[in-house]
Image (cartoon, coloured by chain):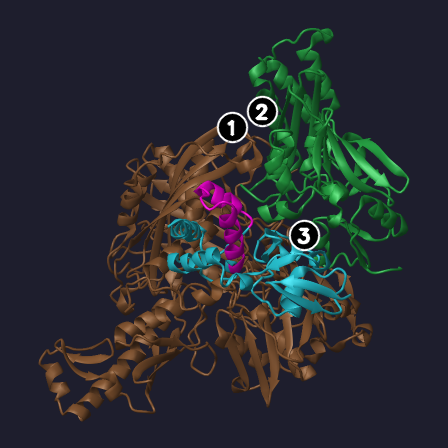
Chain colours: A green, B cyan, C brown
Amino acid sequence: MSGPELVRPETLADLVALRAAHPDRTLVAGGTDVMVGVNFGRLRPSGVIDVGRVAELRAHEVVDGVLRIGAGVTFGRIETSLADVVPALATAARGVGSPQIRAAATIGGNLGTASPAGDAHPALIALGASIELASVDGTRLVPADAYFLGPGRSVRTEREVVAAVRIPVGDGIRQEFAKIGTRNAMVIAVAAVAVVVDLERRRIGVGLGSVGPTPIRAARAEALLAAALWPDGGERVPPTAETIAAFAEEVRRSARPIDDVRGTAAYRAHAVQVMARRCATWCLEEVR
Amino acid sequence: MRLELDVNGQVHTVEDVAVWESLLTVLRDRLALYGSKNACEQGECGSCSVLVDGEVVCSCLVLAGQAEGRSVVTVEGLDADPIATEVRCALVAAGGVQCGFCTPGFVVTATGLLRDQPCASEPAVREALAGNLCRCTGYSKIVEAIARAQAELGR
Amino acid sequence: MTGIGSSAPRPDGDAKVRGRFPFSSDLCVPGMLWGHTVRSPHAYARIQSVDVTRARAAEGVRVVLTAADVPGRNGFGLVVDDQPVLASDVVRYVGEPVAVVAAATPEQARRAAALVEVAYTELEPLCSVEEALAPDAPALHPDGNLVRTIDIRRGAPSRHAADVVVTGTYTVGMQDQAPLGTESGIAMPTSGGVRLLANSQWIHADRNQLAAVLDLPPAAIDVTLAGVGGAFGAREDITLHAHLCLLALASGRPVKMVYSREESFVGHVHRHPAVLRYEHGARADGTLLYVRCEIDMDGGAYASTSWAVVSNAAAFAVGPYVCDDVEIRARVAYTNNPPCGAMRGFGAVQAAVGHEAQMDRLADALGIDPVELRLRNALDEGDLLPTGQPLRGASPVRRILEELRDLPPVAAPLAVPGGTANVTRGEGVVRGTGYGIGFKAGGMPEGIRDYATAWVRLLRRDGEVVAQVRTAAAEIGQGLSTVVPQIVRTELGVADVTVLPADTSVGSAGSSSASRQTYMTGGAVQAACRALREQLVERAHEYHGHRFGELLERGHDISLRDGMLELDDTTLLGLDDLVPPEGLEATRRYDHRPTTPFGADGQGEPHVQFIFAGHRAVADVDVETGLTRVVQLDVVQDVGRAINPVAVEGQMQGGTAQGVGLALMEEIQVERGRIRNASFTDYLVPTILDVPPMTTTILELPDPEAPYGVKGAGEPATISSTPAVMSAVRRAAGRDLFRVPIRPWDLTDLPTES
């Protein structure tokens, strides 16, 4: 390795250049995942790129109906500043770890870690977000549901960094996020669901967390609910309880959960069904 | 590597820091600031809470190098802080301290909270302290202490 | 002056809130090395060889020690010394220490530990009591796999034809004490011996075990209590203590060790998981006719305090109820699971989960209010326990139940189980109210010679008389260091009292466990103060010419107050005139009344004192997802006499919170001997959002045999809190529950295991 062990680029251009030059180095944003590996003796990075000083990554703005959240925006800021813009993501942010974690952990870091239990992921998938990946070769956009490949694995190459997420926003986008944990605070999701009903674009979005090797988009359930709400692409039909129950059942079918130390597969499937039903009901409450 | 860290208003030069070392180990093992405690190593207990640029974070999850150029305040640096003083007095008076291992973390977190939200409601106080585990008190007297500190500060 | 009965603040409070109280992990000595432990990755394996060549050659390494380097007995344990300091031929649990390393830095020590090469031949582990007690099971220890069986029989259950019979099998998961401070300490060589500063609950027991291991006379080992970050039973056994001493003696240097949280989970003993099978027979009016109970406890790989935990489970299996016909059998077995031992509530916690669930179900079966059913069977003064031991002194059981029954209803709006995670906005949420009551014994049982020692000195300083106290009693957060000066102030009328660090230069104080220190060390301090008072009166007699003895005999009252000696409220002398320049001192030992071992059929007087608490719990349960939020807890406890009411409340509230943890989330999950959740991410302890507001009601029904009438305060709330929460969830969910912790899926119709 050449150069200093710790580098702290201040611009995105410098960051991607360093990333290209040192793909073996560990990217650290809020540190809340990387440092657990270090503290448990599982990780001893020989070099670190600290992304925390890149000002461009710490901004968020809405331009032309798209919210762009820089990768370095913390969950604490999403929770407090974006609750009116992307309430489902803000709810997810509020459930991330503890206040201390939320003050440090970033949305880009969450995507970098690419855990199937990452709290932001179901909301990003349901909202139809895109992940902006930057490298010296430029920037590409990856739909959130195409980003994840497996536990801790994503389409991001070792030359790329997460630069931002882009989320379509606007009136008429109803959205809910719910997460099951076995404690009333500070808990990793046993199962999580985000449901989005975009009344203008006639789009349904459903993202699931902790019920498969990656966060999951429940596409068949989305189609089922959209077809029920807008039969043959026509005028909206008020949803019935049966419609929502069928939707929740379809969401359950898209889950691929396993048994682990936090919960059983059967419970996870049950939990996403209940949460999907509730979230859809809340989304559609005022439009019945 | 060599770091210059602004801790409790003083700049310290620390030599031979490994790139992966946490702020917590540097505070404890290099600067002999033992008030920040190591209890879980993964941000699940809040015992190592410090203020970095005014925000409460777990120092076990901050790379020491990331703290360079930022202002770090530990529980020791809050000795003369008026909010922390009331929090400390109230914790002792209310019986919010038993073994005391979690206590510095609570002092730092509560101080950060009351700076930003002096009139935080009890539910808000609980949510703000949800990242600080206490195994001795059952939290009741800690909640009571924060209310007492708020009352004193509001005078 | 803050004597007994006042809520004196903690003397260490200011240092603790400033972060300046030195915990054992904060100690630092120039030139010290750092230790690290090499642990077994297998639950059961034969050690073929241990090769330390590469580890010894690693950077910064000073010493690497294996079983061959243990100079004395390679075994320790509070009851039997069956646990190797470093495993030599066999490892019996995952995490068992095999070698220890000391190096210049923690990182070097950790790296070197990874270089120790141990060759194992794996054996099939015994992972449950059933496997361990199967006839063809291999013996994990020379005397077989059964650690102890307790049979208690009184009367004849079979003589009754009950109107209602309720049976149930209950499972209690393995709980961890999870003190916030992990195991840590420093050992340093001294001329001819070693000095150890570490966290502990009983430094004399540590020293005696260390003496055998190190092959040193006890006097060559000085154990000083270092600042303890909580204990709850986890520090009764030694953990790193022998390793530190071995490394310090071998290296000739001070050696420090601090366990990580992950290591702490494998490094100390846990609460015994248990299976409890009950049969209760009752008359239609609710009168308990008989109780049959079988309890199996998993002791794990080594005995620790299993011997005593199982005896408690058996003795308190029926709960605080009168029942003349009982058959109780409790067993504890060796397995290849993590060793289990002391944790707050010590056997009575497991029993209470069973007996209280049974009482609830019996109440339902009979159509009687659950509190009323308990009242009809409440243990009263003079009633006999299953051991045949009578309950002496006023019984608090009725009072506790009546207080709980008469609490105002909880008006709080429905809470949101799952907190901010947005799972429900009221959908599926049902409120339930439950009750639980429990008891155990304070102090060491079964004829154990249990005592405490205290040294108290009066001396003149700057024209004032001040007192110093030294005991070996461990302050572990419970507040003994507050209570002791309160006693001295009350007894000697001296305001300025310093408690010196606990070390082995005075006699044993016994363990800071079994809710016994205010009683025992408090009793020793009281006795030492009274001896000093006699010396003061004697000196007053010489000084003043008064005939004190005669005056006392004639009923005159001599008191020590505000630094003065007074006769019938008339100040006679300032203590500064009575205390000589060299000071006055007294050492006293306090013994509680003797107890007996269990006799035939488990009969006898094995217990010193009985301590009781009860809870009402109100919980809101999302019955569809199985999430629970406890919204209110009310605890009523009899403490005999509250020496420090705020500290007593702290014990009640803290114990309650640990009971909530066992009820709803705390479980070490073990799979074929391996802990799957050795971290605070996956071993969940209650946060401030999981422990609701609490009310505390202190009852003071004095124990006539105890100093000031005190009763142990540390444990009872931990016993009754779990069954009360379980009961509330049961009511809300409308289904019987048979295990703790209650997992969300236990409240659904889903299969509980896949």
Q: Report the residue at 70% width, 80% height from top.
A: C69
Q: Report the residue at 61% width, 52% height from top.
A: B57
Query: Are discs 3 and 2 located on one and the same chain?
Result: no
Q: Which residue is mark 3?
A: C672
Q: Nearer the viewer, mark 1 or mark 3?
A: 1
- Horizontal arrangement in the rendering, residue A75 relative to residue C313 (left or right): right
Q: Which residue is mark 1?
A: C425
Residue C634, percent across and down? 36, 45
Q: CA distance from mark 1 to mark 3?
A: 40 Å
Q: Nearer the viewer, mark 3 or mark 2?
A: 2
Identify which residue, C221 or B141, lies in the foreground. B141
Magenta span includes B23: no
Q: Report the residue at 72% width, 16% height from top.
A: A201
Q: Kindly give the residue lying farthest to the left in the view shown.
A: C554
Rendered image: mark on residue A278: 2
Q: Amino acid at mark 2?
A: Arg
Query: Are discs 1 and 3 located on one and the same chain?
Result: yes
